[in-house]
Image: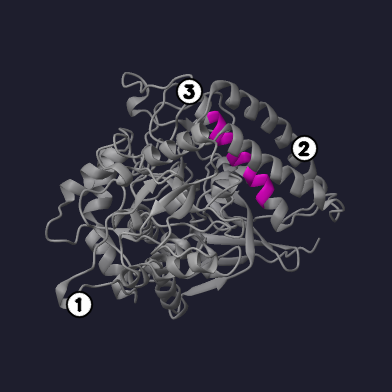
């Protein structure tokens, strides 16, 4: 395997190019040089896939208190209220930042009339700013263009982070994150990239852990796995959000049907045309995602059908084409005229509510290591994310982390050895990677999905222990590739999800266990499930969003 002995050095190393990483980079560029490493092209992350929009209090009939209330209610009692208020109150400034960066949101008749605000599940007010149904793509376009025009920012595309480099890993008593080993996927070269001020995880979520997901192929939980291996705690991994409405069609891979359709009156129906959400929740088809996903799952199990439908036929073709042009055209490609025919939909893994534990400046327990966006667990989402709060979280915490990291004094990075492949040889059985990959995703879908049980979790954990051993042996025996690095991370994240789910002895939000179907308000009601490598059982003194103890374990 090729090696690079001379490390590349920057001030800020950002892993990921979604909304959170770009917000950090644009703010941090005022303090020093920023290197943004992306697994593929900068546009290929989850942000560009976001359809619905970004929630913020900008409407005349809305208030911070109402946005806070809706977030707390959706989070099923597990949100950190201080974090929720921190994010919500910075919502208007986040929108201003995006607009200054070139993002264009839909307005009513002319900009003077204000934004055309949408409404999504769990919201009691219209507060979702959008750009039709390609909001994420518009935000991504604007931020990437601005970043490319900023002198202190450099992109390194088609490079994959393999592991974080920490001082403790090199034998130093005082820990800090120094940089990362980065795989150049085209050549197999592993670069040593060092950061004089901070390393930022902005790697997104872990939807690829499941067989069916709305996420892009890049979401394999890389940042969570790397941080966990480096000794940072992760929390609330049992709360994987399944989006209720992914397009059901054999040729439609991972295509999301935005919740904004239900915000415009879309009704969930059985295949025979009868509605089934009335009586499930006061908001019916606009209920929070955990409730809707479980209701659909129950209907599919009860009837044996492959899908339910989302009915938009009460809206005119002109309205649907204008408001949802991307979804309308994509459905037509598959022979579905949503103005005349209900859309077949099923749930799919969508958003990782848990992640690397941070405070409200994005700091992890490892000095100079930050985590922002979906990779982090900030206390905002609790047991279930409120729709369209994720893009808001990315901007708020990206900027907050940049303000904090920008105040750090540059330091001389101690001598770091180059990547050592040891006795590894080129891979000769790629089928091992694909087989293990497929097995992980299938067992997670079947045993650790929308509804769980103690027996399913025990079976999943037992098999994952064997898979981890097999993958670890394979990892050290052969040269690293992008697929192998992702597989290594995928099995770590799957194990964290299962162990977290087995630990929480109640049902709450996105985590529903048939053997403990009720909430436990006396025990788990305000407790995050926090796991630390090398420690048996969850940490109980750590709270997402709070200042972290200097040393854990």
What is the secondary structure assignment of the residue under circle 2? helix
Packing grade of label 3 (10 A; few <14, some 14-19, many >=20) is some
What is the secondary structure assignment of the residue under circle 3? loop
Please state which of residues 510 and 204 is positioned toward the viewer in this rendering. Answer: 510
Type of secondary structure dominating the magenta stretch: helix
Q: Position of residue 276 (x, y in %)?
A: 36, 39
User: In the figure, is residue 262 to the left or right of 152?
Assistant: left
Does residue 467 lie above or below 158 as drawn? above
User: What distance separates the C-alpha of mark 1 from that of mark 2?
Assistant: 58 Å
Image quadrant of residue 469?
top right
Residue drawn at x 59%, y 21% is 455
One can see residue 31 in this view? no
Residue drawn at x 85%, y 50% is 429
Q: Position of residue 395 (x, y in %)?
A: 35, 60
User: In the figure, is residue 174 to the left or right of 380?
Assistant: right
Image quadrant of residue 311?
bottom left
The region drawn magenta spans 486-499
**Residue farthest along the left direction in this orientation:** 60
What is the secondary structure assignment of the residue under circle 1? helix
Q: Nearer the viewer, mark 1 or mark 2?
A: 1
- Give me the disc on residue 537: none
The mark that comes first in sequence, 3 or 2, is 2
Q: Position of residue 41 (x, y in %)?
A: 58, 70
Q: Nearer the viewer, mark 3 or mark 2?
A: 3
Residue that badge 1 annotates: 111
The mark that comes first in sequence, 1 or 3, is 1
User: What distance separates the C-alpha of mark 1 from that of mark 3?
Assistant: 50 Å
Image quadrant of residue 492?
top right
Residue that badge 2 annotates: 470
- Give me the disc on residue 514: 3
For the N terminus, give its image quadrant.
bottom right
Q: Nearer the viewer, mark 1 or mark 3?
A: 3
């Amino acid at each position: 395997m090729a090696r690079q002995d001379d490390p590349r050095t920057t001030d800020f190393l950002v892993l990921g190019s979604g909304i959170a990483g770009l917000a950090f980079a644009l703010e941090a560029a005022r303090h020093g040089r920023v290197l943004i490493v992306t697994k593929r092209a900068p546009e290929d992350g989850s942000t560009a896939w976001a359809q619905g929009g970004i929630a913020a209090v900008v409407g005349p009939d809305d208030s911070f208190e109402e946005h806070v209330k809706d977030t707390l209610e959706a989070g099923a009692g597990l949100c950190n209220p201080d974090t929720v208020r921190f994010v919500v109150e910075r919502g208007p400034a986040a929108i201003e930042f995006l607009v200054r960066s070139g993002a264009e949101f839909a307005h009513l008749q002319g900009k003077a009339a204000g934004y055309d605000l949408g409404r999504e599940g769990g919201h009691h007010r219209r507060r979702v700013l959008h750009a039709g149904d390609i909001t994420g793509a518009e935000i991504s376009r604007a931020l990437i263009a601005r970043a490319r025009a900023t002198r202190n920012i450099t992109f390194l595309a088609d490079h994959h982070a393999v592991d974080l480099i920490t001082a403790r890993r090199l034998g130093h008593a005082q820990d800090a994150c120094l940089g990362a080993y980065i795989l150049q996927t085209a050549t197999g070269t592993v670069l040593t990239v060092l950061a004089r001020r901070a390393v930022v995880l902005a790697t997104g979520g872990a939807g690829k852990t499941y067989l069916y997901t709305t996420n892009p192929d890049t979401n394999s939980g890389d940042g969570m796995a790397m941080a966990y291996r480096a000794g940072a705690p992760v929390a609330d991994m049992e709360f994987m959000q399944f989006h209720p409405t992914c397009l059901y069609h054999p040729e439609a891979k991972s295509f999301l049907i935005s919740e904004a359709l239900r915000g415009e009156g879309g009704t969930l129906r059985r295949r025979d045309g009868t509605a089934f959400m009335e009586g499930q929740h006061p908001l019916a088809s606009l209920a929070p995602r955990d409730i809707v996903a479980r209701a659909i799952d129950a209907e599919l199990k009860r009837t044996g059908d492959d899908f339910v439908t989302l009915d938009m036929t009460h809206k005119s073709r002109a309205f649907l084409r204008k408001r949802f042009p991307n979804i309308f055209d994509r459905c037509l490609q598959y022979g579905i005229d949503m103005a005349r025919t209900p859309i077949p939909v099923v749930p799919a893994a969508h958003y990782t509510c848990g992640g690397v534990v941070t405070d409200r400046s994005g700091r992890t327990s490892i000095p100079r290591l930050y985590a922002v966006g979906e990779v982090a667990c900030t206390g905002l989402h609790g047991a279930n994310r409120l729709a369209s709060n994720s893009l808001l979280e990315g901007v708020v915490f990206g900027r907050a982390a940049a303000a904090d990291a920008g105040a750090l004094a540059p330091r001389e990075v101690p001598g770091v050895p180059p990547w050592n492949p040891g006795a590894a040889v080129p891979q000769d059985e790629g089928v091992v990677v694909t087989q293990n990959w497929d097995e992980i995703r299938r067992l997670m879908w079947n045993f650790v999905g929308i509804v769980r049980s103690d027996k399913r979790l025990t079976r999943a954990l037992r098999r994952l222990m064997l898979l981890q051993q097999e993958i670890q042996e394979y990892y050290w025996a052969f040269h690293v590739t992008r697929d192998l690095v992702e597989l290594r991370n995928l099995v770590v994240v799957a194990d964290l999800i299962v162990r977290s789910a087995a630990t929480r002895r109640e049902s709450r939000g996105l985590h529903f266990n048939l053997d403990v179907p009720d909430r436990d308000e006396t025990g788990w009601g305000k407790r995050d499930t926090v796991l630390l490598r090398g420690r048996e059982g969850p940490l109980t003194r750590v709270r997402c969003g709070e200042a972290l103890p200097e040393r854990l374990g």
